[in-house]
Image: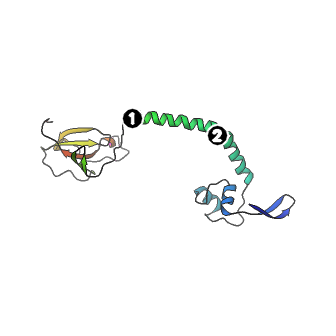
């Protein structure tokens, strides 16, 4: 920023780069949606009034509470790590079709029931990671919407089970 002229005793005309104007207004970049809303678009508009002291006061308050914010962030991170280790993966992304644990699994998207005999014994894996064996006729071959309580029980892949163990 460069002061280029004095308009009055306490008012000055300054030369600033676009990034400096945006930051003086308290925003990080012209791509910030809050800046676009404040400014009426990405490009700096001539006549835009920026109260730099308000932005400065806000950032000063944030800086004063930085250590408390960092402590809270560490606590939240520790809690997230604890939960991550304690809970099973509830959404297992379907792998590419092919080899899984040295056996051929078929990714199933929930569209049509597989073209297998009703008496075929299949092994199915659900989103929550469970693997079960059942006859084709006893398997629920539908997918639930994400907000449904049965969503994590949806089948994501299947394979014809090895002989042994009827259900």
Q: Quadrant of residue 18?
A: bottom right
Q: At x 54% / y 34%, what residue is drawn?
A: 75
Checking the image for residue 87, the label placed there is 1
Which colour assignment does the render follow? Answer: rainbow
Residue farthest along the bottom direction in this orientation: 46
- Label pair 2/1, CB-CB below 8 angstroms: no
Residue 8, x across and y down, in percent: 86, 62
Circle 1 Cα neighbour tier, 10 Å, few/some/many (<14 / 14–19 / ≥20)? few
Q: Is residue 166 above or below residue 56?
A: above
Mark 2 highlights which residue? 66
Gap between marks 2 and 1, in whole Å? 31 Å
Residue 110, x across and y down, in percent: 27, 50
**Which quadrant would the N terminus be assigned to in this image?**
bottom right
Look at the image and say whether residue 76 sits in the magenta stretch: no
Towards the viewer: 94 or 112: 94
Q: Which residues are magenta?
A: 140-150
């Amino acid at each position: 920023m460069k002061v280029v002229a004095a308009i009055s005793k306490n008012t000055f005309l300054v030369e600033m780069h676009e990034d400096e104007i945006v930051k003086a207004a308290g925003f990080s970049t012209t791509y910030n949606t809050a800046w676009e809303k404040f400014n009426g678009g990405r490009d700096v508009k001539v006549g835009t009034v920026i109260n730099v002291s308000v932005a400065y006061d806000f950032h000063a308050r944030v800086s004063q509470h930085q250590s408390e914010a960092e402590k809270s962030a560490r606590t939240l991170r520790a809690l997230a790590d604890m939960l991550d280790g304690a809970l099973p993966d509830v959404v297992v992304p379907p792998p590419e079709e092919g080899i899984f644990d040295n056996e051929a699994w078929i990714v199933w998207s929930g569209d049509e029931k597989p073209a297998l005999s009703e008496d075929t014994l299949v092994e199915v894996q659900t989103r929550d990671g469970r693997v079960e064996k059942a006859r084709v006729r006893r398997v629920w071959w539908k997918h639930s919407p994400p907000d449904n309580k049965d969503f994590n029980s949806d089948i994501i892949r299947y394979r014809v089970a090895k002989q042994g163990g009827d259900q």
